[in-house]
């Protein structure tokens, strides 16, 4: 009885961590997934994963789908709908936009005395002049996707002694 409860709680925590990794850290989805209202869905989802011996979190099981879409909290319903993938909004916003003002090469503040004189007398402005040149950034290849880690806690609980290398002599 206690063993099953520990296994379910551990599975629930790992499920929550995986769901949080699907979205950016500052999004509403992460706030909802960490809320107490969503814990009931996580508990039943973890129990379903243990009963069916399923280690994959997606696709969302149909029982969890009906429970989540029938929840009284509208934020939980919206978040479950996002997990179902029926929304066209991407899960991640991606990399931040590189500002175009940084793609300009030219005199920058603090100006050297001769640059300031040129800018004021010949050009007549400190910004948007012919001394600026556009910079082309080199293309950066996308990093390879990280391999999905195995969940060592789903198969059985472990303690510190399970991970000890017994071939080496212990430190005395």
Image (cartoon, rainbow, N blue to C red):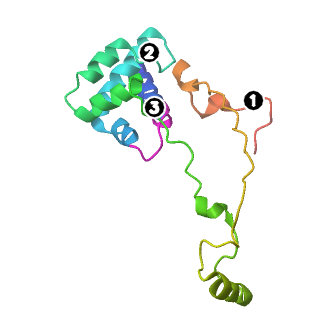
Q: Which residue is mark 2?
A: 50
Q: Position of residue 25 (x, y in %)?
A: 46, 45
Quarter of the figure with residue 62: top left
Q: Are marks 3 and 1 in contact (CB under 8 Å)?
A: no
Kindly state the secondary structure of the residue where label 3 is placed. helix
Q: Is residue 142 above or below residue 167?
A: below
Residue at image location 43% in from the left, 16% down from the top: 49
Kindly state the secondary structure of the residue where label 1 is placed. loop
Q: Which residue is mark 3?
A: 19
Q: Are marks 2 and 3 in contact (CB under 8 Å)?
A: no
Quarter of the figure with residue 32: top left
Q: Which residues are magenta?
A: 18-27
Quarter of the figure with residue 72: top left
For residue 115: magenta?
no
Q: CA distance from mark 2 to mark 3?
A: 17 Å
Residue at image location 23% in from the left, 25% down from the top: 71
Front disc: 2 or 1 = 2
Q: Which residue is mark 1?
A: 166
Which disc is residue 51 wearing? none
Relative placement, left or right, of 115 versus 148 is right
Relative placement, left or right, of 81 versus 21 is left
Residue 77 in view, yes or no: yes
Q: Is residue 127 above or below residue 31?
A: below
For residue 22: magenta?
yes
């Amino acid at each position: 009885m206690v063993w099953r409860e520990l296994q379910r709680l551990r599975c629930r925590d790992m499920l929550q961590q995986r769901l949080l990794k699907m979205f950016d850290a500052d999004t509403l989805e992460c706030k909802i997934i960490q809320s107490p209202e969503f814990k009931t869905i996580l508990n039943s989802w973890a129990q379903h994963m243990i009963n069916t011996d399923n280690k994959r979190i997606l696709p969302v099981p149909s029982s969890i789908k009906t429970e989540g879409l029938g929840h009284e909290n509208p934020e939980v319903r919206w978040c479950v709908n996002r997990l179902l993938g029926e929304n066209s909004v991407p899960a991640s916003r991606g990399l931040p936009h590189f500002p175009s003002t940084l793609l300009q090469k030219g005199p920058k503040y603090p100006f050297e005395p001769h640059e300031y004189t040129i800018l004021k007398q010949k050009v007549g402005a400190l910004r948007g002049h012919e001394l600026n040149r556009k910079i082309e950034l080199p293309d950066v290849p996308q990093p390879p996707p990280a391999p999905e880690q195995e969940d060592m806690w789903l198969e059985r609980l472990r303690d510190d002694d399970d991970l000890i290398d017994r071939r080496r002599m212990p430190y005395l």
